[in-house]
Image: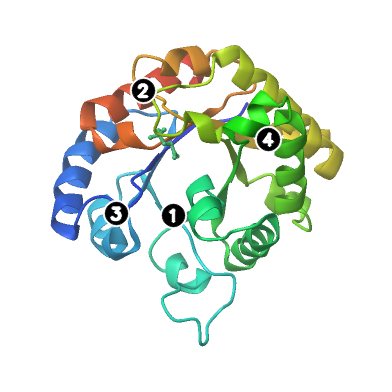
Amino acid sequence: MRKPLVAGNWKMNKTIAETRDLVFTMSMKLRKIEGVEKVICPPFVSLMAASALLEGSGIGLGAQNMHWEEKGAFTGEVAPGMLKELCSYVILGHSERRTYFGETDETVNKKVLAAQKAGLTPIVCVGETLAQYEAGQTSDVVSTQTRAGLQGATSDFASKIVVAYEPVWAIGTGKASSAENAQAVHAGIRQVLSEMFGKETAQAIRILYGGSVTASNAAEFFSQADIDGALVGGASLKVDDFVGIVSQSKVAKGE
Ligand code: PGA
């Protein structure tokens, strides 16, 4: 059985001091919830402070991006090995990275392979834009992004990869996908993963839904067979909301 995973993507929010406060308060509540993998992804500069606070808590820490090279003349970038000293997860190919910072399936793939080499668990984001959704291209877009993003991964590593389906039109808009629509897309992603890595590996991969997840709609998503958790943006900055979402994943999916 797949262990549910709920990750909070803080995006470009919170100073180091604010991170300390929020992680401290959140971790007191989150550490009591077992049977769910919980991950917090603050900005790079706060990873050090957060990792110190989370030590021994059972709560995972992740970055929101990284470069694929090990080191070198890449001003402003952060290498996989540098992250590995601080955290275990890294969000890759988020739609905001694709839209504002020119990330492509090709660069996402380089980063996924770099995560494999460094021993980081990537949370690889895929999802269609509103125009693609309206044109009925969701399945094609998401399949292409999944194939291109994960190609070349070993099956052993693939089983540890986390995929996040985040329809771009649902991110930060308050307009979440319906749970049924998300389930259909997740089942399609699992089919692609099965073709790439075999059925057994595909069954082990967690596929998260992301896009306006709240404590009020989370349970509906978690009740779907192929939805293994959530990647949460806005609601991950509010203690009660995020803790509420994590608790509901335990109710729906946990032992
Ligand atoms: P949201 O963001 O929960 O604020 O819609 C999700 C995400 O971008 O990962």
Q: Is residue 125 visible?
A: yes
Mark 2 vs mark 3, CA separation in Å: 27 Å
Instruction: Pinpoint residue 232: horizontal percent, then vertical percent.
Output: 40, 34
Q: Is residue 120 above or below residue 196?
A: below
Which residue bears the numbered disc 3?
A: 55
Q: Nearer the viewer, residue 88 or 10?
A: 10
* Label 1 beta carbon within 8 A of ligand 1: no
Nearest-to-viewer mark from 2 and 4: 2
Circle on res. 64: 1
Q: Is residue 9 above or below residue 17?
A: above
Which residue bears the numbered disc 4?
A: 204
Mark 1 vs mark 3, CA separation in Å: 20 Å
Sequence order check: which comes first, mark 2 or mark 3? 3
Sequence order check: which comes first, mark 1 or mark 4? 1
Badge 3 element: loop
Q: Amino acid at mark 1?
A: Gln
Nearest-to-viewer mark from 1 and 3: 1
Q: How is the image coloured?
A: rainbow
Mark 2 vs mark 4, CA separation in Å: 25 Å
Badge 1 element: loop
Sequence order check: which comes first, mark 3 or mark 4? 3
Q: At 57% across and 62% down in the image, what residue appears?
A: 119
Mark 3 vs mark 4, CA separation in Å: 27 Å
Label 2 crowd bin: few (<14), some (14–19), many (20+), radius 10 Å? many
Q: Quadrant of ligand 1?
A: top left
Badge 2 element: loop
Q: At 15% across and 51% down in the image, what residue appears?
A: 18
**Number of numbered discs overlaid on the protein picture:** 4
Q: Nearer the viewer, residue 46 or 26?
A: 46
Q: Is residue 98 left or right of residue 45?
A: right
Q: Is residue 241 above or below residue 216?
A: below
Q: At 19% across and 59% down in the image, what residue appears?
A: 16
